[in-house]
Image (cartoon, grey):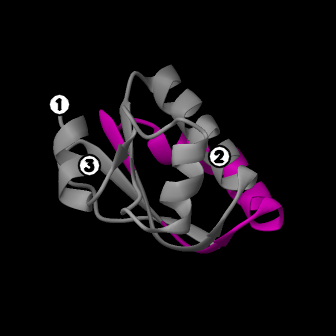
Amino acid sequence: MTVEPLPQQGRVRVLRATGELDVMTSRSVLPALPEMVEGAAGVVLDVSAVTFFDSSGLRLVDRLARACGGQGAQLRVVAPPGTMARRVLEIAGMVAHLVEDDLASAVAAVEP
């Protein structure tokens, strides 16, 4: 699994996760989250290309939300309907105010 910053869209930082998001792969990403969101007014985590998403993915989203909160940045997660990530986020009750279906909607939701 990788989480890479994409070109910034205004003051919105977009992070794209790919591959499997499990306990082994998320460990390397968690410490870098505060640096990834530093200076952003809004942050979007795109998990559309994640092929495996479990409680480690929830932990990543939670830590990212805390990092954003510490910076005063809004957060949205792109998890299209029908994806594994969307289903896990639904079960955890995190969809209502956090998840968007596509990147454009997520960016628009966090733009200052």
Camera-side residue: 60 or 93? 93
Q: Secondary structure at mark 1?
A: loop
Label 2 and label 3: CA atoms lie apart by 18 Å
Amino acid residing under circle 2: Leu
Q: Is residue 82 above or below residue 109?
A: below
Look at label 3 and name its amino acid: Ala
Q: How busy is the neighbourhood of tag 3: few (under 14 within 10 Å), some, or many (20 plus)?
A: many
Which marked residue is nearer to the observer: mark 1 or mark 2? 2
Tag 2 residue: 58
Q: Could you tell me the amino acid type at mark 1?
A: Pro
Q: Is residue 17 above or below residue 55?
A: below
Real-space CA distance between mark 1 and mark 2, rounded to the nearest whole angstrom: 26 Å
In this view, the residue in front, 38 or 80, is 80
Give the residue at x 35% y 55%. 14
| Residue labelled with disc 1 | 112
Q: Position of residue 2 (x, y in %)?
A: 60, 71
Q: Quadrant of the C terminus?
A: top left
| Residue at 53%, 56% in the rendered image | 87
Quarter of the image for the N terminus: give it. bottom right
Q: Quick check: marks 1 and 2 in contact, CB under 8 Å?
A: no
Q: What residue sits 55% from the left and 66% below the top?
A: 84
Residues in magenta? 17-44
Q: Are marks 3 and 1 in contact (CB under 8 Å)?
A: no
Q: Is residue 31 above or below residue 51?
A: above
The mark that comes first in sequence, 1 or 2, is 2
Closer-to-camera residue (90/13): 90
Q: CA distance from mark 3 to mark 1?
A: 12 Å
Q: Which one is earlier in the sequence, the residue at label 3 or at label 1?
A: 3
Mark 2, Cα crowd under 10 Å, few <14 / some 14-19 / many 20+, is some
Q: Secondary structure at mark 3?
A: helix
At horizontal 37% and vertical 62% (from top left) the residue drawn is 81
- Say the numbered circle drawn on residue 106: 3
